[in-house]
Amino acid sequence: MALTNMQYEAIIREYNAIQDYERQALNDRQAIVQEKLPEYRELEAQTASLSVSYLKRLMNNEPGAREALHNELETLSAKKSALLERYGFPADYLQIHYHCPDCKDTGFIGAQKCHCFREREISRLYDQSRIRDVLEAENFDTLTYDYYPADALSHYEKTVQLCKDFAENFDRNPGRSLLFTGTVGTGKTFLSHCIAKSLIDSAHSVIYFSSVDFFDTLSKNVFDKSKDGLYSFYDDLYNCDLVIVDDLGTELTNSFVGSYFFSFLNERQIRRKSTIISTNLSLNEISERYSERTCSRIVSIFEPIVLKGQDLRIQKRSRN
Ligand SMILES: [Zn+2]
């Protein structure tokens, strides 16, 4: 989906606001010139009467009339520019100042989105992800193998490659989902951040939740009776290209919220949307903590990725 309709409309509103602002700014500059330079006013009047005086000749298709008008208008325009320059106004003072000259602040070049639209789109996707700042620091470019113990290194390298493949071929594998398991500090969260950044940069929508936030938001929205909030929350949750639930098992849960977790997995699967879950729990523990059907749903949907090794955070601290 990349953007929701609401996000898309918000971007269009931004372009409309820029256009209104710049049109008003141009009007203000025109008023200043009119007020300060009576000669400019005179040239403007000449421009208007010139066009009127040519009207009949143009309508009669008089040979050479169009070219003659064009030349006279050019001469007047050059006089106006020279006048502005003489009084110290910048050359583009009486032109619209486009923020993006490529699309003239419309966001589109023909039917194609302009690069500036795409930048706005990606920026919104970062905001939506809830981890904009984290992704600056944790991504495939900053990933290092330095702290990985030698015996687990080749397994880790293969896992990184699988994560890159997941992100690069995302559109070719709708609904592909990953379950990162393994002990604390083996890089599960970091890898999910790497995937998130890579996907957002290619204009996919990603929402990240810590498990605590995820269940908290689920239960708040279950009890929230305001329809609009609820609609937009579920719209994002079910239609977003990738949802990441980090550290499953660290939340306080109950069977009521647990059943919404099952619905969430179900809905994402039906819509062929990808999900990444990371957890320190084993499958047995997942089954005990949530339910057997939730566990079997996870087994059937998710590709398990086991991260091995000792706690990298301890390794880092001991070396620093
Ligand atoms: Zn543009």
Image (spheres, grey):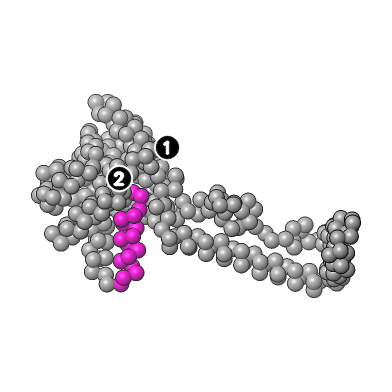
Q: Is residue 144 above or below residue 45?
A: above
> In the rendered structure, which segment of residues is drawn in magenta?
226-242
Residue under the point 57% across and 64% down = 16
Q: Is residue 236 above or below residue 41?
A: above
Residue 219 in sight from this viewpoint: yes
64 relative position to 261: left or right? right
* Image mark for residue 141: 1
Residue 229: say if magenta. yes
Cβ atoms at labels 2 and 1 below 8 Å apart: no
Residue under the point 66% across and 66% down = 23
Residue 42: say if magenta. no
Q: Which residue is mark 2?
A: 175
Sequence-wise, the earlier of marks 2 and 1 is 1
Q: Amino acid at mark 2?
A: Gly
User: How many residues crowd around disc 2 within 10 Å: few (fewer than 14), some, or many (20 or more)?
Assistant: many
Where residue 319 appears, x then y in whole percent? 31, 34
User: How many residues crowd around disc 1 within 10 Å: few (fewer than 14), some, or many (20 or more)?
Assistant: few
Q: Nearer the viewer, residue 168 or 173?
A: 173
